[in-house]
Image: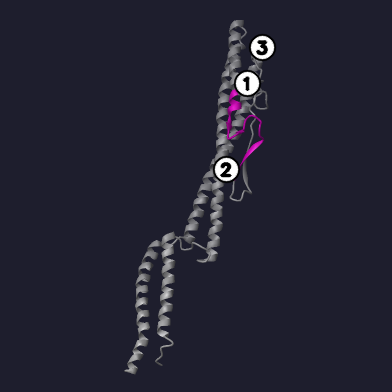
Amino acid sequence: MATINTNAGAMVALQNLNRTNMELEQTQARINTGLAVSSAKDNGGIFAIAQSMRADVAGYAAVRNSIDLAVSTTDVALAAGEAISDLLVEMKEKALAGADTSLDTASRTALNEDFKALRDQVSTIISNAEFNGTNLINNSVTSISALANSDGSNTITILDENLSLGGGVVTVAATASFGTAAAAATQVSAIETSLDNLNASLARLGTGAKALEIHKTFVGKLSDALEKGIGNLVDADLAKESARLQSLQVKQQLGIQALSIANSAPSSILGYFR
């Protein structure tokens, strides 16, 4: 039927052109963003999974920061503990020399002054072994904790090691000194006990620091794996999209020509009236 009221050919051509334009816009969006799924309307299920994984990745970034903070605090405590150990060794040397009964009073007094200077240095180190306001060796906290997973339900805990003079680890008193050979011998015994205790404390701190480092490495690998998984889900194949873009551009031009041809069809009706 020849009619000018309804142009079925033009309708079909317009529908095809509109569909081509929509596909072209989608392909251009993928090329612009690099994502095959950039919003929920692209693929609701995949977008939801990707967003959940992105939340985990963000959580693990916070975990790494927490671990870094705990590692730094523990490293400062370890450095201080090792320095205290060296000082105790020197103090033992002074006290042992002072325990020599053949030593004259002046020499023992000089050794005692050196001993007290080293003792006071221990206290100075302890008070300065602080990172970000946390001191792990002066009994100011019971422990420190680092996040272990992305939802904060697990933590890694490092216990405090009280290395203060006269404490449970370093049994040498804050006022320790010697004026006699017997007193010096007593200090030697206290220092030896302190060194044994300190070695055990350093071992615990070292084990805790190692655990933090191992978990930090694991978290980094896990975060990388999650990011790779997100990419597998939502990233666009740009080589494929580039080829598709060229194909759709040609298809668009053909659609425009087809619509033009369909729109010109009613003009042939004029021939019936000549």
Q: Nearer the viewer, residue 8 or 146?
A: 8
- Sort mark 2 into few (<14), some (14-19) or many (20+) by Cα contacts within 10 Å: some
Q: Amino acid at mark 2?
A: Ser
Residue 141: x and y, percent? 66, 34
Say whether residue 87 is visible. Answer: yes
Q: Is residue 145 magenta?
A: yes
Q: Which residue corresponds to mark 3?
A: 182
Say whether residue 104 is visible. Answer: no
Q: Nearer the viewer, residue 133 or 87?
A: 133
Q: Which residue corresponds to mark 1?
A: 191
- Sort mark 1 into few (<14), some (14-19) or many (20+) by Cα contacts within 10 Å: many
**Mark sitting on residue 66:** 2
Tell me which residue sits at (43%, 82%) in the image: 11
Residue 14: x and y, percent? 42, 78
The alpha-carbon separation of the residues under discs 1 and 2 comes to 36 Å
Tell me which residue sits at (56%, 53%) in the image: 56
Q: Are marks 3 and 2 in contact (CB under 8 Å)?
A: no
Q: Nearer the viewer, residue 269 or 216?
A: 269
Dot in front, 1 or 2: 2
